[in-house]
Amino acid sequence: MSSSARTTHFPRDSHTFVESEFHVRYAETDNMGIVHHSTYLVYFEEGRSQYMRDMGSDYAHVEESGFQLPVTEAHVRFSGSLRYGQKVCVRTWIAESLSRRLTFAYEISTGGDSEVLVTGFTRHVWTDSAGKVTRLPGIWKSHFRTRAG
C-alpha cells in the first residue's frame, strides 16, 4: 500500500497529526464494491506506521531496540463507507501516551473531502521482547509523547 503523508496541525483538538493518502484497492472491498469493515483496521495500521515514519522512526526500529507495542484494544465507528477506487485519507495522532500505554486516534475520509466517514482508536502497551509489560522506554519518549500544542 503506497501512501503519501504530510504532518499538519490539527486545530480542533490541538494535536499534531499525519495524513496518509492512498486509493482503495479492489481486494479490500466486498461484492458491492464497498470497503469491508475489517479493512479499516488495516487502514489504521497504515496511518500508525506513517505517523511513526513521519515522526522520525519506524516500528521496525522499536522492535530492533528490544520493545514491542501490541494492540490491546481497537474501536471503530462507522458513519459512512468508502468504495473501490476512492482516495482514502487517514488522519492519525497520538491521543494518549502514558507510562505503559499508548493510544492512537484516527479519522478516515475520502481524499480532499472534509466529511469524516470512520473514526476510531487503537490502544497499545509497551512490552519487552519477551512480552512483559514495561514502561515507555526513554529512547522512545520523544517519538511517542502526546504532541499537543
Image: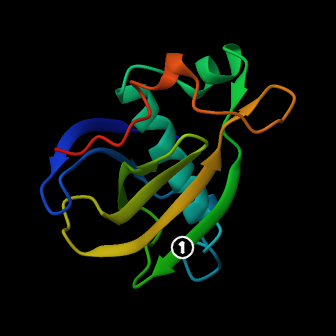
Taking depth in this image into account, of 139 and 17 the one nearest to the observer is 139
Query: Which amino acid lies under the numbered mark 1 shown in the image of this protein?
Result: Val
Please tell me how many numbered marks the rendered image carries. 1
Taking depth in this image into account, of 60 and 101 the one nearest to the observer is 101
Spot the residue most to the right. 130
Residue at left 43%, top 36%?
A: 50
Residue at left 41%, top 27%?
A: 143
- Locate residue 72, reporting x and y percent: 70, 56
- Locate residue 80, reporting x and y percent: 40, 83
Q: Is residue 44 left or right of residue 113?
A: right
Element under disc 1? strand
Q: Quadrant where the C terminus lies? A: top left
Taking depth in this image into account, of 91 and 30 the one nearest to the observer is 91
Q: Which residue is mark 1?
A: 76
* Display colour scheme: rainbow
- Locate residue 54, reporting x and y percent: 35, 28
